[in-house]
């Protein structure tokens, strides 16, 4: 027993000190290290002003970029970014169907599929991600980013080809329900596991202003067959 305790003590004593809180920049650096050479196309869903894609471009400069945003408030910014990196901007909502849907555009930075409590709604075109990838003939492997405020499941339902050819997925996830039917972070982790992905890194852990409880974070998911998941040592 003393020998076992000695071995365990030595193992844990050799572990590095806890890392500083991870930022999105750090997550993207890790993404570049883990899958960067594989990624041919980055798909930014919920692109907003394009700031995330710009940051991603620093880590993955050789990928093509598809920016998907339903709120046309950001059209000028996204068009400039698309021109800058020879990318594509689509002003549609990502969904599980090709057609139209009602979109909550009451908040330029927090929109989503309209609910009964939406302050203002507009009808916008919607497309499956698989349709957009086929239309623009964008090759995989893909890095899919979702900043979609609780409407991840319909988007994933329209992205079967995308997921089958994805090197990774980055999703903003939540510990409190932010929309009817939205998944909590552990439920989304389970949904991603059912699609063959496991969490590999996280960043930007945030507290809810109202009470200081865990609010949201971003998770990098990698395919379950990624070599990192076969490593069993601490070092």
Image (cartoon, grey):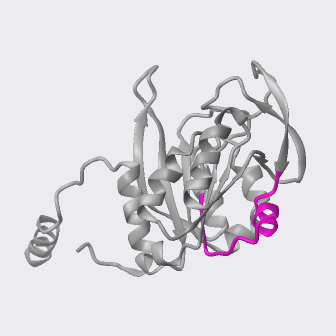
Q: Position of residue 210 (x, y in %)?
A: 46, 19
Q: Is 123 above or below relative to 220?
A: above
Q: Please provide percent x and percent y for residue 91.
A: 75, 45
Spot occupied by residue 15 in the image (x, y as percentages of width and height): 17, 66
Quadrant of the drawing holding the N terminus: bottom left
Tell whether 124 sits left or right of 24.
right
Residue drawn at (79%, 59%) of the image: 158
Image point 33% across, 50% down: which residue?
22
Q: Position of residue 219 (x, y in %)?
A: 49, 54
Res 32 → quadrant:
bottom left
At 72% from the left and 36% from the top, the residue drawn is 72
Task: Choose top left, top right, bottom left or bottom right for residue 235.
Answer: bottom left
Kindly identify the residue that appears in the image at 58 percent across and 73 percent down: 40
| Residue 149 seen by the camera | no
Q: Is residue 20 above or below residue 141?
A: above
Magenta segment: 127-144
Q: Is residue 113 visible?
A: yes
């Amino acid at each position: 027993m003393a020998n076992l305790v000695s071995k365990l003590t030595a193992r844990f004593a050799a572990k590095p000190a806890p890392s500083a809180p991870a930022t999105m920049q750090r997550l993207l650096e890790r993404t570049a290290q883990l899958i960067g050479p594989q990624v041919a196309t980055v798909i930014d869903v919920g692109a907003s002003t394009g700031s995330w894609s710009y940051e991603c471009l620093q880590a993955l400069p050789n990928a093509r970029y598809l920016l998907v945003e339903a709120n046309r408030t950001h059209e000028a910014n996204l068009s400039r970014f698309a021109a800058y990196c020879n990318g594509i901007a689509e002003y549609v909502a990502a969904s599980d169907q090709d057609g139209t849907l009602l979109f909550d555009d009451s908040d330029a930075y927090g929109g989503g599929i309209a609910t009964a409590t939406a302050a203002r709604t507009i009808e916008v075109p919607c497309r499956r991600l698989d349709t957009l990838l086929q239309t623009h003939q964008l090759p995989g492997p893909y890095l899919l980013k979702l900043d979609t405020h609780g409407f991840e499941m319909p988007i994933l339902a329209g992205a079967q080809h995308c997921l089958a050819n994805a090197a990774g997925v980055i999703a903003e996830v939540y510990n409190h329900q932010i929309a009817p039917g939205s998944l909590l972070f552990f439920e989304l982790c389970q949904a991603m596991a059912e699609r063959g992905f496991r969490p590999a890194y996280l960043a930007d852990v945030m507290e809810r202003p109202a009470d200081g409880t865990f609010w949201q974070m971003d998770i990098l998911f990698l395919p379950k067959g990624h070599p990192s998941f076969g490593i069993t040592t601490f070092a």
